[in-house]
Amino acid sequence: LPARKAPGPDGFIAEFVRACWGTIRQDFLDVFQQLFELRSRGFYKLNQALLTLIPKRADANELRDYRPICLIHLVAKIFAKVISLRLAPRLGGLVSPNQNAFIPARSLHDNFVLVKQSLMLLHQLKAPQIMLKLDLTRAFDSLSWPFLFEVLGQYGFGPRFREWIAILLTTSSTRVTLSRLMRRAHDYRILQPLHPRRAIPAISLYADDVMIFCHATEDDVAASKGLLALFGQASGLRVNYAKSSATILHGEPTTAEMITQLGCPVVELPITYLGIPLTLRRPSAAQLQPLV
């Protein structure tokens, strides 16, 4: 943990633990021994966070000029870090090579290049395709906890590891600065420290940024919508079609009518993906200006 990162409601930073370890060592060991034995009674007092705003610019005077941050209790932060270190060595085998969010030695640029190359190849093949850029509604807030634990179980994580995750989730609470305590049904700020470190793909996923390629046929469009609906029912992650978009590649005039069943707007290239302009041509200086 960074030594001088802003403290949570306890007021302690990581440097304090290092400097006073000889004095507080046994207290920390007692807490972690209880957590190891899955005895979480009272842990909610050590699993609180402060929600506050920090300015994005020196002359900030509007709400949009501020960024919210969560300042987590040091004990909960260390516990989450311990779990993330246990998880990190397995991430490479658990997460598909095409998915790069929060995985060490992987980059978001790989996702962009993958989509860009797929787009170029489909254009060269003149293949009638639809490229769907999907927006997941409040992805980290709406993820189903039972779904999360079921997936962990299917990947071979034992009951104890899953219970540690459950303790972090179910005992967490957030207090808005100068306000009362709020307990949320889904409090994902505690998972922040758990962030892990010629075939054409059908799906590219970076965190909650989803790109799907499907054939420009009524059957494929209907199947894609049905699969997304089933996934949403199982996981809690639902597509906000109003904020999503569809781009037609070499489609027939009737292709736009197929997309109406999705309820998302049809847009032409260039579009923005992962903050970078996605186009079949070399991006113009104007398109790249927001990145400078």
Image: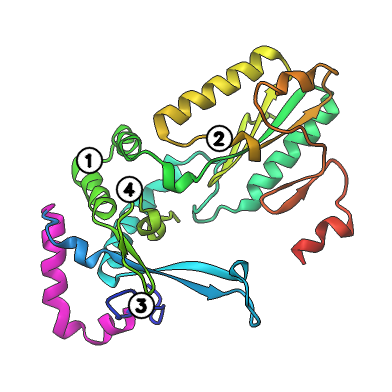
Residue highlighted by disc 4: 185
Name the residue type under label 3.
Pro
Q: Are discs 1 and 4 less than 8 Å apart at CB?
A: no
Which amino acid does the dot numbered 2 rest on? Val
Task: Residue under label 2, please give it.
Answer: 239
| Mark 2 or mark 4, earlier in chain | 4
- Is the C-beta separation of discs 2 and 4 under 8 Å? no
Q: Position of residue 80 (x, y in %)?
A: 31, 60
Upstream in sequence: badge 2 or badge 3: 3
Q: Earlier in the sequence, mark 1 or mark 3?
A: 3
Q: Earlier in the sequence, mark 3 or mark 4?
A: 3
Asked if the stretch drawn in magenta spans residue 19, the answer is yes
Which SS class for mark 4? loop
Tag 1–tag 2 contact (CB < 8 Å): no
**Is residue 113 magenta-colored?**
no
Disc 1 vs disc 4: which is toward the camera? 4
Q: Is residue 55 left or right of residue 31?
A: right
Query: Quick one: label 3, few (<14), some, or many (20+) residues within 10 Å?
Result: some
Residue on which disc 1 sits: 158
